[in-house]
Amino acid sequence: MTPRAHLPRRSFLVAIPFVVALLLGLTTSPAGADMSKKVIAAFKGKILVTKAPLEMAGDDKTTIAHFKKQTLTEIKGAVGGDDVLTWNFVYTAFLKGTGATSLKLEFYDGTNYSADKSLTGVDPKMTVLEGDIEITEDDNITKGKTYTIKLTGTVRGKEIVFATTTLKMN
């Protein structure tokens, strides 16, 4: 009997979170590899919302100014094929700490919780996280409202806010 070639089950199981993330429109990637400690420190605890992934722009001072210029305070939604208003954006989160393997982007209208998007498969040593999000009216987001977005996670049983931003949904 000739042995059959097959993929180890581990490979399949490792791929599942990435496939699920792609299907849900959620992606994350480490973004801090090319950033200096000074650039990371300038934005520590903040989420920068942009149209496209952030790119380094020379020295630290120039890069910090470039990142600030690229950051959005409001985004415009578009009606999708199912007649539901949808917002898409890229985020770069500069985490205040490490240790979480799963995170959530939580949306608050004032102090009222509105929605969240889960991020799984996070490297617990990561200090900068980049990805893109799609969120819709069906997720309880309302056009014209301004939301506080908190990137949260649990470390050793304690809920931690790693980064925040404010974003108006138009």
Image (cartoon, grey):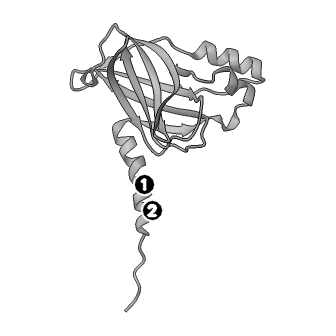
Q: Position of residue 110 (x, y in %)?
A: 38, 10
In the orientation shown, which residue stands out farthest toward the front?
Answer: 157
To which residue does mark 1 refer? Answer: 15
Instruction: Determine whether, in the image, residue 31 is placed left or right of residue 102.
Output: right
Residue at 24% x, 21% y is 84
Residue at 50% x, 17% y is 165
Quarter of the image with the C terminus is: top left
- Specify the amino acid type for callout 2: Ser
Does residue 50 appear anywhere in the picture? no
Quarter of the image with the N terminus is: bottom left
Whether residue 160 is situated above or below residue 50 in the rendered picture:
below
Does residue 128 appear anywhere in the picture? yes
Q: Position of residue 12 (x, y in %)?
A: 40, 61
* Secondary element at image label 1: helix
Residue at 71% x, 21% y is 63
Badge 1 density bin: few <14, some 14–19, many ≥20, Cα 10 Å: few
Please tell me which residue lies in front, 129 or 41: 41
Please tell me which residue lies in front, 131 or 156: 156
Q: Position of residue 41 (x, y in %)?
A: 69, 24
- Specify the amino acid type for callout 1: Ala
Q: Position of residue 58 (x, y in %)?
A: 76, 24
Residue at 67% x, 27% y is 40
Pointers 2 and 1 in contact (C-beta within 8 Å): yes
Residue 159 image-quadrant placement: top left
Q: CA distance from mark 2 to mark 1?
A: 6 Å
To which residue does mark 2 refer? Answer: 11
In the orientation shown, which residue stands out farthest toward the right?
Answer: 59
